[in-house]
Image (tube, grey):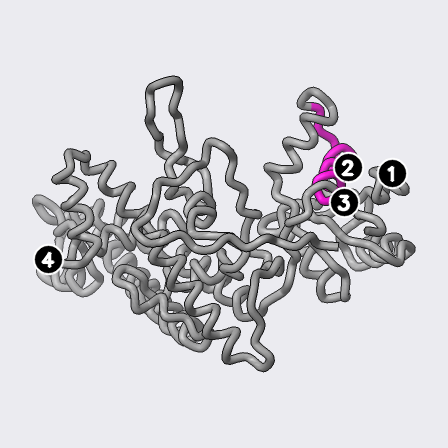
Amino acid sequence: MGVIIGMDPHKRSATIEVVDERGQILAVGRYGTDRAGYAEMLQAGRKHPDRLWAVEGCNGIGRHLAHRLVHDGETVVDVPTKLSAQARVFATGNGRKTDPVDAHSVAMVALRTPNLLRVEVDDDLIVMGMLVDRRDELGRARTQTINRLHRLLLELFPGGAPQFLSSRKARVMIATIKPRDLVGKTRRRLAVELIVELEAIDKRIKAVKKELAVLVEARGSTLMGLTGIGPSGAARLLADVGDIHRFADRDRFASWNGTAPLDASSGDQKRHRLSRAGNRRINRTLHIMAVVQLRNPTEGRAYFDAKKAADKTSMEAMRALKRRLSNVVYAQMTADQKRREAASPGGHSGTTLQSSVTDLTPDVGSSDKPLPGPATNQPRTVLPAVS
């Protein structure tokens, strides 16, 4: 196997520990993340010819270093923070936490876990991730602007503005009033400024959605053909999931996105509870998809009504629908990936361990048993070890 270089990354520093195949510590060091510090760290790592870099949290604080290492031709695997935290507790027996201890935990996880995701930099997916993050930021800014506008219009108009307010409706309303007192004039002027800001935000959102739609279609994805998934939802799925083959089956995918219920049975009592774990951004995308399907005469609406007829509560029926939609998305992404691989030169089959620095390694524990889905189970693929 050679050596494992475990890294505990931070914004301005990184601590590494080099261990051999038996777990013996060969070297420890702390380096800066500026050009000089990174070059020194890379030089220290390259003293070992057969090496594997294990970076904690490649979807978060470790992303910038993981990308730099990959660009420099290094082999990098993503170590989820949850796994390294468990290794740290088992190793120390308490909550003691330092950078060298964290680096050691990361190295031990990489040494003993054969199916960690290998980091690969996919420019298209990185751009999608950045744009969809920008779209979410604009959405939050739009909500804040509308809330401020509602507050001012409530003071200008008895009863305030309609619940679903747009910039056009706000302009029509504000044009009908011309206060004569200083307070009223100031409120109207501030409302006009907020309307201008809302128009600018809407324009940016429209441009980002258009750009995302082009990127998703260029990727060969058909996710936007599913009811309830637009350019933002499709881009979020592609950017966060990366290679769909990293999930052995749709049950692993459901556990990763948090739509699989957790088994909370005890003795003769059989019950499941809502999972609060998983990728919450993908869970939100599936929730929006479910809400849109419920508002239209779709198969999702029929499935929801069938669950309600079977004495399920509205919340239980919604959870079951999100679980079903997770299967639909998994099947669609799997089909798209197969078509993409077949169309590429020398298309390949089987599973892969490559990641786009998207998210954590899927990990299903004994309590993460998903409910059975509507279709037949996908065949389980054995994941090869990363060396």
First in sequence: mark 4 vs mark 2: 2
Quadrant containing the C terminus is: bottom right
First in sequence: mark 3 vs mark 2: 3
Residue 104's disc is 2
Q: CB under 8 Å between callouts 2 and 1? A: yes
In the picture provided, is 60 more to the left or to the right than 156? Answer: right
The image shows a total of numbered marks equal to 4
- Magenta-highlighted residues: 96-111
Which residue, given by chain and number where applicable, does mark 4 sit on? 177
First in sequence: mark 3 vs mark 4: 3
Q: CA distance from mark 3 to mark 4?
A: 65 Å
First in sequence: mark 4 vs mark 1: 1
First in sequence: mark 3 vs mark 1: 3
Q: Pinpoint residue 135: horizontal percent, then vertical percent.
A: 40, 60
Q: Pinpoint residue 208: horizontal percent, then vertical percent.
A: 39, 68
Label 3 CA crowd tier, 10 Å (few <14, some 14–19, many 20+): many
Q: CB under 8 Å between callouts 3 and 2? A: yes
Circle 1 sits in a helix, a strand or a loop, which is it?
A: strand
In the picture provided, is 158 more to the left or to the right than 61? Answer: left
* Amino acid bearing label 2: His
Label 4 CA crowd tier, 10 Å (few <14, some 14–19, many 20+): few
Q: CA distance from mark 4 to mark 2?
A: 67 Å
Circle 2 sits in a helix, a strand or a loop, which is it?
A: helix
Q: CA distance from mark 2 to mark 1?
A: 9 Å
Residue name at image x 60 percent, y 61 percent: 352
Residue 25's disc is 1
Residue name at image x 72 percent, y 44 percent: 110
